[in-house]
Amino acid sequence: MILAIIENAFLSLIGSAIPASAVVMLAATGAMLGERVGVLNLGQEGLIGIGAVYSVIAVLSWGVESPWLAMLIGMIAAAVAGLIFAVCVVAFRASQVLVGLALALGGIGLSNQLGVNRNGTPIQTLFREVNPGGVLDNNDAVSAFFFHDPVVYIAYVGLPVVLYFVLFRTRHGMNMKAVGENPAAADAVGVSVTGWRIFYSVLGAALTGAGGAYMVLSFTPTWSPDIARGRGWVALAVVIFAGWRPGWAVAGALLYGSMISLDTTAQARGWGLPFMGASDLSFFLSMLPYVVTLVAILIPAGAVKLGRRVRSTAAPAALAIPYSREER
Amino acid sequence: MRSKKNRGLLLPPSETISRRQALKMGAVGIGGLAIGGSVLAACGDDEEESGAKESIKAAWVYIGPPDDNGWTQEHDRGRLAAQAALGDRLETSFVPNIGFDAGTTETFQQLVDDGNDIIFANTEYAGLLTEVSDNAPDTKFCEINGHYYSDNLFPFYLAHEKTAYQLGVAAGHLAGNGRIGYIGAFPTATAFNDVNGLLLGARSVNPDATVETVLVSTFFDPQKAAQAANALLDAGVDFLFGVMDEPTFLQLSEEAGVWTGYWNLDFRSAAPTKYVSHFDLSEFGPFYTEQCQRVLDGTWVSQDEVWLLDTPIGDFGPNVPQDVQDAVADAGAALDSGELHVYAGPLNDNEGNERLAAGETLDSLQAYAIDWPVDGVTGISPV
């Protein structure tokens, strides 16, 4: 009985967490790409907004009828913003923290401005869920993990597998890590630190933009100001939680997504404490994702402090440090 | 007027004021005097003594964007209606996206300083507004869903418990399993009148009907609304309604094949096959026009009870069967004639306490102050 209740609760939470945090997953993967080559982009929040608003513009103003094309347009817009960021911090060696914050705030402002007159207009060009058809029955356990749209599978399965393979199984990945850990050594063996850093910053920005596009093309099919609402910052936290490892980012994003969904799911399912209903706990429940984020970040930090397995969870050694051949 | 303007200046401790700063502040003071003087001069005109004015300025403060396809858009339509009715004699402006923070008070103060004769607020700003209105006796204020009364401020709102009841009658017919979902913002009278009206209307048709509520602590956050809608749809409701300012949940209902309705305006395009009806807010235009006209005539007076606007139920969606439409119309006629009451005892709240004894009823003014959900509503508790 108790087990059935817990299983039911787990399934309804995870079922709504998976689509809810696909955007976090995409942004975390994008941020991780940049950070692996030593570029810290704090502008995720702004990139989500830019990716989202250009997808909205593509659908509502340019008449784009394919969600894939709308997402691509959002990704290109975010990539352009990422390129400006990368040129500032890599070529001109400006402070990554300052330029990143400027991108976060500027991106939010720009996207809100572009979204004027598009608030609340429903978007009909949407990703459709993949229906496994006769292969699987549509019961609770199955529908929690399947019956999502294709972007969800790309975000949670495709990207982490590809990134894991590239990072840990190829020479190319070794070079990436070298650029992030010891750019002088990479430079010495002929890897262009500047080129690699710019390329992966731009690619990372495009992935984050895809997260924003996903928000408006599937999860909430409408534009609204400040659309990211903290998801960009959570993505940065997920990267730290994951110790810069793609697989762990999936766990981090799902943990965060479950906490986000807990508020509304608990109310809809009538969960609560004996003395307090879920609606009275609403503010506490909506605070939980951030508390969990904080705790989750402290765990790897604590591991470092205790000297356990430091190597695998530590940040790339050259993260956020501009590289100059003359100064090495 | 002038002293009011200077309230906004943050004065540094006097011993640290440099000569340059003192000069600057002197200049501001003189500027303020000049503005104050011109306003005083205007007040001395003959026409002012009878109270009538040639033309006035009116401003609207909006919680959301005027293109939200919902609540704020309907208010802005009302503003434009007043503008059209009064022509050159009325100059209107609006400030969108005003939330609840210290900047809100500054916004109202700015509008007073800009010489607006009357200011409308399209959400309850409470203390953030009254702090300004109490110090601006020459400016009139109307605050929607407010609870503060003074010589220059009164609240107005909608008698929407009747509309919710009528939508509830439709929901009682249409929701096969009798389960109605509701996305609310805060546990206030607005939410209680919505869920109570829905439940009592639905129970007039299906005695086993229930209303399941999710509160999201905001009127405009499509992501949050989408989460709440998905949670309720996944839980299995057969009819979904909400007080959200934008129509995201309609679209999600359509995709889930669940009947849905909207608060603000006819938005069947978001749910082409599953749209039921909406709360018709077209009374804002006449209300705004009348208040501005009264300021022009010099006959504007504050009220000592809330000014409630009629809120008819809107047109039905294409797939609502005719017998359901007829049942809703019958209930509406009975409510209007006074033969039927939304709140008629005996009624218990959802914690089992008797709130209305047999034979007792609540009218719309009493419903405006309601703070309890009737038995059968879940997810929201008495305040």
Image: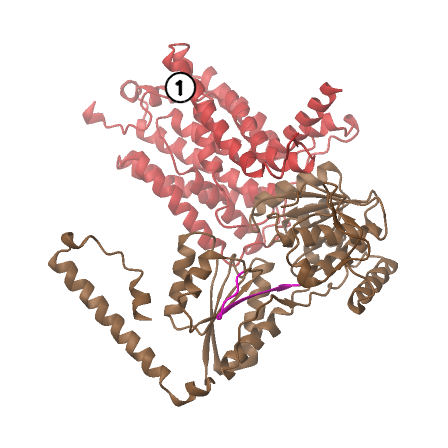
Chain colours: A red, B brown
Q: Position of residue B318 (x, y in %)?
A: 79, 59
Question: What amino acid does circle 1 point to?
Answer: Ala
Q: Which residue of the protein is positioned furthest toward the left in this rendering?
A: B19
Question: Which residues lie in the magenta part?
Answer: B148-158
Front residue of B355 and A280: B355
Q: Is label 1 in a helix, a strand or a loop?
A: helix
Residue A149 showing in the rendered view: no
Q: Position of residue B20 (x, y in %)?
A: 13, 59
The correct choice, above or below, for B145 with respect to A326 in the image is: below
User: Which residue is painted at 51% across and 35% down in the image?
Assistant: A287
**Viewer-proximal residue, B215 or B17?**
B17
Instruction: Work out whether B163 lies above or below B42.
Output: above
Badge 1 crowding class, 10 Å Cα cut-off, few under 14, some 14 to 19, many 20 or more, is some
Q: In this view, does B117 lie above or below B344?
A: below
Judged from this view, the residue extending furthest toward the bottom is: B46
Left or right of A89 in this view: B123:
right
**Residue at x 39% of width, y 73% of height:** B115
Q: Residue furthest right?
A: B323
x then y, percent, for residue B74: 60, 64
The one of B139 and A206 positioned closer to us in this rendering: B139
Q: Is residue B366 above or below residue B53?
A: above
**Label 1 chain ID:** A
- Which residue is denoted by mark 1 in the rendering? A301
Quadrant in which the N terminus of chain B is drawn: bottom left
Is residue A258 shown to the viewer in this render?
yes
B259 drawn magenta:
no
Q: At 81% across and 67% down in the image, what residue appears?
A: B333
Residue B40 picture location, percent across and down: 33, 80
Quadrant of the rendered image containing residue A197? top left
Q: In which quarter of the image is residue B308?
A: bottom right
